[in-house]
Amino acid sequence: MTMRTTFMQKTLLAVLTALFGAGAFAVGALADTGGVSAAGSPASPAAIHKTGIATWFGPGFYGKKTACGQTMTPALVGVANRTLPCGTLVKVSYRGHLLTLPVIDRGPYSHIGADWDLTTGAAQTLGVEETVRIGTRIVGIAPNTPTLGLPAGALTTAPALAPAAAATGGAVAG
């Protein structure tokens, strides 16, 4: 009987350890996103921080609405992604430049297998002039509003924002 009880205790301990470890991983994932959980965001660390191919878009779309409701202008700073919810904040790195961008549209629709489509404003800020490989990391989520992605100077009704907030239209990732 003692041997069976010891086996059951060890099994229970192993199960509890596994469950606790999974819970700690989930808390760690929230810490990686600044404590903000983006609905529908991937849970694995590899999916949260990875590289991908980025194109950029703009001139042919100026004056049109994005899938998330913003009006496309040269000043709009954001990114398009096929699956992430509108307002998801993505930290993008390219050649030493870092920029936190909100998802403001669906795409890319190029036939080269790109993962991301930068607005003209985002591409210029990052120094992107062609199709490139970028680093990405989901860092949070911001409310999706018609002004999301507009620099502070373009927001006539909003108070002045800090430079970090201006790059994401007022959304600041933790």
Image (cartoon, rainbow, N blue to C red):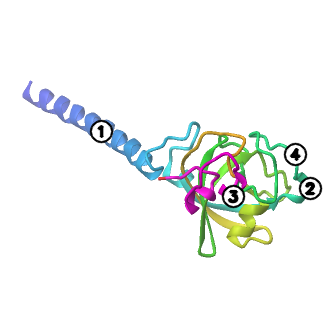
- Say few, some or many: other residues with alpha carbon within 10 Å of mark 4 (under 14 / 14 to 19 / 20 or more): few
Mark positioned earlier in the residue sequence (2 or 3): 2
Q: Closer to the camera: disc 1 or disc 2?
A: 2
User: Disc 2 on helix, strand or loop?
Assistant: helix
User: Disc 4 on helix, strand or loop?
Assistant: loop
**Which residue matches tag 2?**
60
Mark positioned earlier in the residue sequence (1 or 2): 1
**Which residue matches tag 4?**
64
User: Disc 1 on helix, strand or loop?
Assistant: helix
- Measured in 3D between alpha carbons, the distance from the residue under mark 1 to the one under mark 4, in whole angstroms, is 49 Å
- Measured in 3D between alpha carbons, the distance from the residue under mark 3 to the one under mark 4, in whole angstroms, is 20 Å
Front-most of 27 and 99? 99
Q: Closer to the camera: disc 3 or disc 1?
A: 3
Mark positioned earlier in the residue sequence (1 or 4): 1
- Image location of residue 166, percent across then percent down: 62, 57
- Measured in 3D between alpha carbons, the distance from the residue under mark 2 to the one under mark 3, in whole angstroms, is 23 Å
**Which residue matches tag 1?**
20
Identity of the residue furthest to the right in this view: 60
Quadrant location of residue 38?
Answer: top right
* CB within 8 Å, label 3 to label 1: no
- Say few, some or many: other residues with alpha carbon within 10 Å of mark 1 (under 14 / 14 to 19 / 20 or more): few
